[in-house]
Image: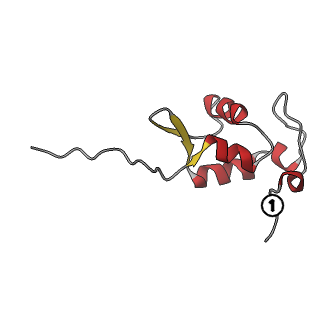
Amino acid sequence: MTHTPSPPTQPNGIPIRDAAAQIPCCARTLRKEIAQGRLPAFRLGPRIFIKPEDFENYMQNIEWFSGGPQAPPGLTAVPPEVHGVGRTV
């Protein structure tokens, strides 16, 4: 009899809502980015997670995060300090 490992209950990933809270957008925007292939993600049951390194890479590569002209439709670029992003402790 072989043992099939069960999936992890605590994945090595950031939940969508937590990721959205780190940048000036909502979870729905991140879901659209995932659906369009711009942000890698994985599912564990009904929940969607983003690997920390994929999220970091995504934030570094999007112009709108730093207030650039390429904001996704319906999203206004907001200076990171307004939402606490980039704040040093």
Percent across and percent down for residue 24 are 81, 44
Percent across and percent down for residue 82 are 89, 52
Q: Quadrant of residue 25 in the image? A: top right
Percent across and percent down for residue 58 are 68, 47
- The 10 Å Cα crowd at callout 1, few under 14, some 14 to 19, many 20 or more, is few
Percent across and percent down for residue 12 are 49, 53
Please say which color scheme the image uses. Answer: secondary structure
* Residue at the extreme left: 1
Indicate the secondary structure of the residue bearing disc 1.
loop
Toward the viewer: 77 or 70? 77
32 lies left or right of 3: right
Dividing the image into 4 quarters, which one contains the C terminus? bottom right
- Which residue occupies 52% across, 36% down? 47
Q: How many marks?
A: 1
- Which residue occupies 45% across, 51% down? 10
Above or below residue 12? Residue 42 is above
34 lies left or right of 4: right
- Which residue occupies 71% across, 43% down? 20
47 lies left or right of 88: left
Q: Which residue is mark 1?
A: 86
* Residue at the extreme bottom: 89
Dividing the image into 4 quarters, which one contains the N terminus? top left
Amino acid bearing label 1: Gly
